[in-house]
Amino acid sequence: MKSQIILKPGKEKAIKLGHPWIFSGAIHRVQNAEQPGTSVDVCDHKGQFLARAYYNPKGSLAARIFSRQAGQELDQAFLERQIRAALARRPALRPGFQTMHRVVASEADFLPGLIVDQYADHLVFQILTAGMENHRDAIIEVLKTIFSPKVLMERSDEAIRTKEGLHERKEILIGSHDQARTVAYENGMALTVDTWEGHKTGFYLDQRLARQMVESYARGAEVLNCFSYTGGFSIAAKRGGARRVTSVDESRPALEILEGNWRQNPGNEDCQMENVRADVFAYLRQLREQGARFDLIVMDPPKFVSDRAHIDRACRGYKDLNLLAMQLLREGGILATFSCSGLISRDLFQKVVFGASVDAGVDLQILHQLSQADDHPLLLSFPESLYLKGLLGRKVSLS
């Protein structure tokens, strides 16, 4: 018996428009697909073929489409073809200027559940779904064939795997733990990346364009970089001509890497550096009590919400941070503020920042709407692929 899922009447519209997700509530019947990750035909209520997907009965997001071609298997040949196509769509890497990027961005590159990041000769991948987990061996062989990496590492240590019935996993497949750190280049910045212990796969690649923007506004500025991690925005501000950069993060290892990044990016030697290990919320309130002021503030917090039930709480957190930032900005100062929470829409985030400006008694001239870099593409048919929202604005007082 063929493995397939039959949709309820009317539920095929989004699929025909290119959306890759099928929720359990849209499914009328499932045939011969008891094992998580089984490849299936997706058919409308009349039995007409729509797409190929893999199915998982364990969650509400039941199926993810990987092909629109009848009979297509999620095999090694298909994986190699799709990964090569994704790589070909990326801007060329240039040694000494740009040597790190995202190669595969899950659904946005038509490989749902797979992420592949490259840092110079280090390659890091994440498998987030049962459908991709079933083809892990093939994925590894394809990555070896295409990239011949010096270090190949799996960072499938994301909690989202539990929703797929999977355990978290970290493993070095080529190389060793003492090779986990590497130096890669972004826009000419030399940045140390810890691919084993670092956040995500080691670095926040999606903020490449935003860091360029911050660099362009940093000349002569006193800069506060909140949730600084290993200092991508801090180094960009230094390169842009900042006179002082204060970086705040709770992680001592991240701040230690930041110090190394500062040293290995010469130039603007008069720029003063201060690294503060602290809770950002508490530290911002302390700065406000001290009457501190800054010309440029970067507010790039971690993901605040992964469940719709907690959206209101997340919005309160974003509002508090932006209110404090606006109170700490000098008149005419620049705020670069972000949300990487996929459940927070761009419109909602802008409303939250507006609410903060009202409470602060100021206004914000929005100079740029920011988003994820071009190696984290947005599919028009899959709006969920837009997760990073940013605003860069100038503080102006209300008259």
Image (spheres, rainbow, N blue to C red):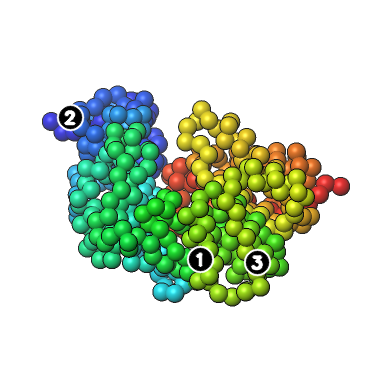
x, y (%) of residue 165? 29, 33
Tag 1 secondary structure:
helix
Which kind of residue does numbered mark 3 sit on?
Gln
x, y (%) of residue 204? 47, 55
Residue at which label 2 appears: 32
Between label 2 and label 3, give the one nearer the viewer. 3
**On screen, 48 above or below 200?**
above
**On screen, 228 above or below 346?**
below
Q: Say which of 227 and 277 sits in front.
A: 277
x, y (%) of residue 161? 33, 38
- Distance, label 1 to label 2, CA atoms, is 53 Å
Residue at which label 1 appears: 261
How dense is the environment of label 2, judged by Cα within 10 Å: few (below 14), some, or many (20 and up)?
few
Disc 2 to disc 3: CB gap under 8 Å: no
Tag 3 secondary structure:
strand
Which kind of residue does numbered mark 1 sit on?
Asn
Q: Say which of 3 and 154 sits in front.
A: 154
x, y (%) of residue 198? 42, 53
Q: Residue at x 21, y 46 (%)?
A: 135
Which kind of residue does numbered mark 2 sit on?
Asn
Residue at which label 3 appears: 272
Tell whether 117 sits left or right of 57. right
- Distance, label 2 to label 3, CA atoms, is 64 Å
Q: Residue furthest left?
A: 1
Between label 1 and label 2, give the one nearer the viewer. 1
In this rendering, does residue 32 appear at all? yes
Give the mark nearer the N terminus: 2 vs 3: 2
